[in-house]
Amino acid sequence: MGGEGFIELDGVEKVFDVRKKAGFLKRERRLVRAVDSISFSVARGEMVGYIGPNGAGKSTTIKMLTGILTPSGGRLRVAGIDPSRERTRLAHRIGVVFGQRTTLWWDLPLIDSYRLTHRMYRIPDGRYRENLDRLVELLDLGALLDVPVRQLSLGQRMRGDIAAALLHDPDVLYLDEPTIGLDVVSKARVRDFLRELNAERGTTVLLTTHDLQDIEQLCSRVMVIDHGRLVYDGSLAGLHEAGGGERTLVVDLEREVPPIDVGPAARVVRVEGPRQWLAFPASQSAAPLVARIAAEYPLLDLSVREPDIEAVIAKMYAERAGHAAS
């Protein structure tokens, strides 16, 4: 592929022809541009967050990258392959996990889905055995292999889906909301595994998520798509700066005290008995703030809450509109 990226999009568009009823016999025709001339490149071994509000064009992009949808325009390559033209060849190079729906066989024990994958991808026996053992150990699936998929909890099923997507040693893993609906422990386990997979195998990961902590803990780069256009490509700290986002520090004190005085570094946004909520710029570390509160106040517990993606993007647009107007 020369100097190109491992995943390469150049002016990619996807236009849908939507027909809607507009009366008894009439149908209205409307062209919807779901992806509007997107260009980006992902290097082999990169972990990239691909985020944006619902309906922004994230899923449409992923479907084009897997060959499910054909672009209306532009050029798209994954590992040198045109996905829509060589979908079967590409299938052996990619793994896909959709948080909202499973690729596992609902009524069969988990191990049966893996055996089917083994046959479908024609994975050499030794490689299959080795990969299965490794994935079962890393994702803690040993006790679940004989359990029908429908009896698994959401967290267990998600780990099962991730293993299924990786049995054939894909070069690229597409993850669509992999931690949606998971509890804190399951989220941590999935994130730890993905980090290890990337470090060990150099697997390229493209992650779409609504959970900024997924991005913060896994990705050094984040791309934001909105209304089918790429509106940001850079670090998460840079996104917070561009959006002027705020994180919230929730502080539990031993007793009720007047609003905490933290100077210009933060502001108290709410007080409820011994609990106080402090807002501070998302681009800044919480450490100095925490140290100051711990030194001067009877601190019991605290937690940091991330701004949600929609809030960050909305602020980013507001800033832009402000700059444009001035």
Image (cartoon, rainbow, N blue to C red):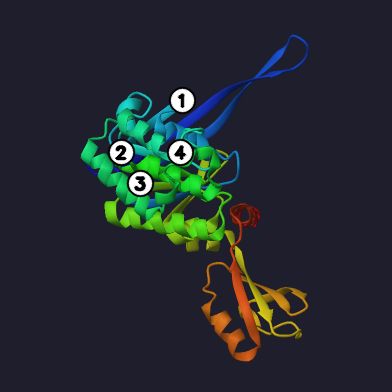
The three-letter code of the residue at mark 4 reads Ile
Pick the residue in front: 29 or 55.
55
Badge nearest the viewer, 3 or 4: 3
Q: Residue at x 50, y 56 (%)?
A: 186
Q: Residue 180: x and y, percent? A: 56, 49
| Residue at 38% from the left image edge and 48% from the top image edge | 205
Q: Which residue is mark 4?
A: 38
Q: Earlier in the sequence, mark 4 or mark 2?
A: 4
Q: Is label 3 in contact with label 1 (beta carbons under 8 Å)?
A: no
The CA distance from mark 3 to mark 1 is 21 Å
Instruction: Tell me which label, 1 or 4, sits earlier in the chain.
Output: 4
Residue 193 visible within the image = yes
> What secondary structure is marked by label 3?
strand
Q: CA distance from mark 4 to mark 2?
A: 30 Å
Residue furthest bottom in the image? 296
Query: Marks 2/3: CA distance?
Result: 21 Å
